[in-house]
Image (cartoon, rainbow, N blue to C red):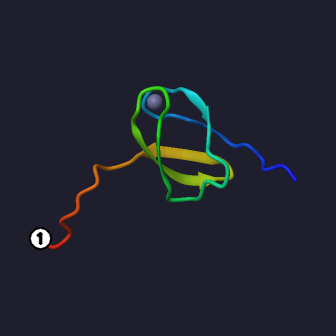
Amino acid sequence: MSVPRLNGTCPECAADFALPAGVMVNELLSCPDCGAELEVLGLDPVELANAPDVQEDWGE
Ligand SMILES: [Zn+2]
């Protein structure tokens, strides 16, 4: 059995790269080209967006 390879395009630098096998929607990836943090919005078709800076303080 082969896992289908998905390709995405970085919204930051427009590089095409292969997504990791088994990638899930809402997963965070970093672009192998520019290192931008990307969030997977969809897989069919593949849609990537810049991930917001992760803030740990949700309380205030
Ligand atoms: Zn990039």
| Residue extending furthest toward the right | 1
Looking at the figure, which quarter contains the C terminus?
bottom left
Residue 20, position as x, y percentages in the image: 62, 45
| Position of residue 1 in the picture relative to residue 27 (left or right) | right
Where, by quadrant of the figure, is residue 18 drawn? top right
Where, by quadrant of the figure, is residue 19 drawn? top right
Callout 1, which amino acid?
A: Glu
Q: Residue at x 28, y 54 (%)?
A: 54
| Residue extending furthest toward the left | 60
| Residue extending furthest toward the bottom | 59
Where is mark 1, residue-wise?
Answer: 60
Q: Residue at x 84, y 49 (%)?
A: 2
Q: Residue at x 51, y 27 (%)?
A: 14
Q: Is residue 51 above or below residue 55?
A: above
Residue 5, position as x, y percentages in the image: 73, 43
| Position of residue 54 in the picture relative to residue 21 (left or right) | left
Label 1 secondary element: loop
Q: Residue at x 59, y 54 (%)?
A: 42
Q: Is residue 21 above or below residue 34?
A: below
User: Within 10 angstroms of label 1, few (less than 14), some, or many (20 or more) residues?
Assistant: few
Of residues 60 and 30, which is closer to you in this image? 30
Residue 37, position as x, y percentages in the image: 40, 42
| Position of residue 35 in the picture relative to residue 15 (left or right) | left
